[in-house]
Amino acid sequence: MGTSLANVAKATEAALRAAEELRLSSIAIPGMGTGVGGVPAEEAARTMVGAIRQHLSHGSTLREILLVSVDERLSRAFESVLGTSPP
């Protein structure tokens, strides 16, 4: 049993909304859906970053959003989607 990209987006959005309700300035969000959910890392990263960008386009109390990965594959996917490289 896997998950869908829609669920990855909903979970990301829910975390961001909760952070806004708490008036947080930073949040760490783990990569979602790539473990037992079976979502390919690249698709999960693209979906999560898209949800974050959409959220931020409406204004936000958040100033720092950390994307957390437990493996290199997802880390590279986040870096690719964001156009960044590790420090």
Image: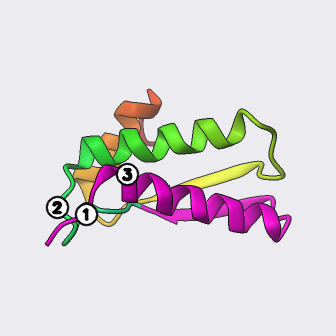
Mark 2 or mark 1, whichever is nearer to me: 1
Question: What's the mark number on residue 6?
Answer: 3
Left or right: 20, with 13 as reference point: right
What is the three-letter code of the residue carrying label 1?
Thr
Q: Give the quarter of the image for residue 7.
A: bottom left
Q: CA distance from mark 2 to mark 1?
A: 7 Å
Question: What's the mark number on residue 3?
Answer: 1
Asked which secondary structure carries label 2, the reply is: loop
Left or right: 39, with 84 as reference point: left
Single out the residue that lies furthest toward the top. 83
Question: What's the mark number on residue 38?
Answer: 2
- Say whether residue 66 is magenta: no
How far across and how far down the image is residue 43, in percent?
Answer: 28, 42
* CB under 8 Å between discs 2 and 1: yes
How far across and how far down the image is residue 49, in percent?
Answer: 48, 41
**Magenta-highlighted residues:** 1-30
Query: Could you tell me which residue is drawn at 40 percent across and 43 percent down?
Result: 47
Q: Give the quarter of the image for residue 36.
A: bottom left
Question: What's the mark number on residue 30?
Answer: none
In this view of the protein, can residue 71 be seen by the observer?
yes
